[in-house]
Image: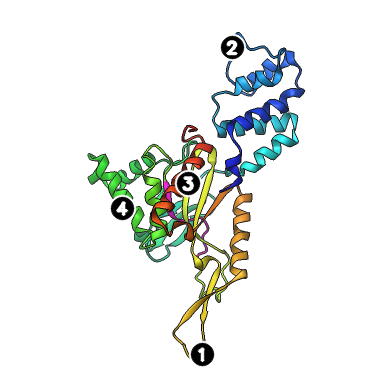
Amino acid sequence: MSSTSAVTPAALRHAIAGALHVVKAYELAAVCEHLGLEPQKPDEDPFKSKIIYVRARLQGKTLPELVDIARLVISEYGDDDLQALVGMLGARGVDGEMKNLIFAADGPKPQIVLPDSISNTIRIVKNEQYCLVYDQALEDRGLSWADLVTWWVRRHPEHAGDPTRARISLRERLRRSLGDNGAELLVFDTYVKLGFDLPALIPQVYLHYDPYSLTELNGVGHLTRQRMDFLLLMNHHARAVIEVDGIKHYSRESARTAIQETATTRQADPARYAAMVAEDRQLTLQGYEVYRIGGHELRDHAAGESMLTEFFTRLLTCHGHLQPQ
């Protein structure tokens, strides 16, 4: 579990109030108004306790809203403790607007060209039938299941009069992109059970893209991983990459003995593992949250489902999509 789970709304409210303790009591009401906090109630008085006053004004704010307020406080007043707390979240969101979302790939890699590189306009010229491309504007709340179904119905008008059928059809198409990977299917199916009024869990996403094949690059690719297992697009530009790690993520296949030519085993591959975690660092610095789930955690179906339900519930709560338990 990421350290983000240690940062609660209450802890952030307290840290923001502490950072604003430097403000004079007679100026605090105006500062709170500038920060967009809740209106002052008749019984709230900054002269009695500035800490209690600010905490009360922060009540009702979700964690993402508190993070935005905290960043504004840091930029105007500075506070090492508050900065450290926000840093623990690792959830500043990704700068820039989403332009291309290529996902649910269930076949050969799509071939992509840039007909207008200045506008970052892409066109798939081969293998388009094996992937989906979401081409709608992204709301500040991210990409929800409802948004995805609406887009799916536009592509498949035969489902227009039957929302349930549309959801089932979309779900089955997304599941198909996971093939027979039992661990990834368990992640997807567990998330779907959490409800429809949530961000969509998008499988098999081309987060990076290199148009050249490994053969053309003499076996040395420019990008460590091009396709991510899952992506969540959440409130306030927050984006979470979720990877399910099997043994291939940190080992390589090699011949066991000269006699047993067809038998293979797995050997630890430090270079492969190092490349993977280096890429994680780059994604985190870009504003993505990266969560890795060990395939071993999912070997027991019931235990895996319980763990995943807790994980997704805490993640969605942190980003204001679920109410705290």
Q: Which residue is mark 1?
A: 258
Q: Position of residue 8 (x, y in %)?
A: 59, 35
**Could you say which disc has been placed on residue 41 in the image?**
2
Return the disc, 3 or 4, that comes first in the chain's sequence: 4
Model colouring: rainbow
* Range of residues picked out in magenta: 201-211
Q: Residue at x 36, y 61 (%)?
A: 130
To which residue does mark 4 refer?
172
The disc, 2 or 1, on the residue closer to the chain's N-terminal end is: 2
Q: Nearer the viewer, residue 69 or 101?
A: 69
Q: Is residue 31 visible?
A: yes
Q: Is residue 204 magenta?
A: yes
**Residue 272 picture location, percent across and down:** 59, 68
Q: Is residue 20 left or right of residue 106?
A: right
Image spot of residue 301 (x, y percent): 39, 55
**Amino acid at circle 4:** Glu
